[in-house]
Image: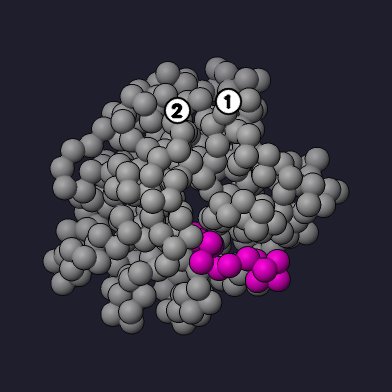
Amino acid sequence: MAMINTVRGEIESSELGITLSHEHVLLSSAGMKDTFPKLIDREYVIRQAVDSLRMKGKYAVRTIMDVTTMDAGRDVKLLERVSKEAEVNIICSTGIWMDIPRVFWNSNPDDVADLFIGEIRYGIEDTGIKPGLIKVATHAGGVTQEGELILRAAARANLETGIPITTHTYACEQTGRQQIKIFQDEGVDLNNVYIGHSDDSLDIDYLKDMLEKGVWLGMDHLTFEYREGLPTLSQRLETIIHLIDSGYEKKIMLGHDWAVAMPIFGQDLIKDRDDYNPHGYEFIGRIVLPKLLHVGVTEMVIREFMVINPRNFLTGES
């Protein structure tokens, strides 16, 4: 059985259980917890996360992929405490999100890849906690010069370590295509790549084209109906069902892109989010899966989405 890095050490892939593919506990900015600690009540965040992740029942979550990078305020000691107290597996991430540090702008991909590889091999910030994911992002406007550097660095870190890549995309501009092209150019096995936020697109041709190239699709904005201009939950589920009917259920994963605390966003947006989803990390189990079952999606497909596909992605299987 393959071994997977979590914030509490390696586990066998058989221990993953029901897994959410794209989540956060805390979304902040680099250095906030040390430089301006008053901005983040870490003890409050830990209590809220533990309460949210202590689940029971048929669809109780056993693992979350926390895709928070250093520029988004990654705090692996916080994640370690949440994992221990909630008794859930948390897989943390190396890589860089959208706030690419200026110090990287004039670097080269090999130098940045070495930093990612060092965290994978030796641990993050002298904690010994090793990431199980490499996170990158491409937003509105497509791949920038600095963004391409990070994508290539992530690709080279993947080739060196085997740790899979997970991405943020701006689906309405189909930036997943750009990411895939760079990963292909670097020689990455696309079975090691997860294209996130794909359910923000209703363009079936775009989604199928990416699937045919061999990547995994993250249908991981399932709580985002509250954001103006994005697909409704019903539209997202119709897209998922269409992909199931087309035979792609073995390459799809589900998630929320949830966070217990996200001080990078305004209070009005946070209130809208919380009003729309009072279930937190249980939204998929309580709302999404029953809706899929109601329209004829089988328990076996649900298991693919929530257990088998995340395991195969993390271990490089297919």
Which residues are drawn in magenta? 182-198
Which amino acid lies under the numbered mark 1 shown in the image of this protein? Thr
- Dot 2 surroundings within 10 Å: few (below 14), some, or many (20 or more)? many
Task: Please give the name of the residue rendered at 39% of the width and 56% of the height, measured from the top-left corner.
Answer: 310
Q: Quadrant of the C terminus?
A: bottom left
Residue carrying label 1: 127
Is residue 309 left or right of 69 when viewed as pictured? left
Disc on the earlier residue, 1 or 2: 2
Is 72 located above or below residue 159 in the figure? above
Q: Position of residue 53 (x, y in %)?
A: 30, 35
Per the image, is 190 magenta? yes
Which amino acid lies under the numbered mark 2 shown in the image of this protein? Glu
Label 1 with label 2: CB-CB less than 8 Å: yes
Label 1 – label 2 distance at C-alpha: 10 Å
Q: Quadrant of residue 288?
A: bottom left
Task: Please give the name of the residue rendered at 32% of the width and 44% of the height, measured from the top-left corner.
Answer: 15
Residue 96 in sight here: yes
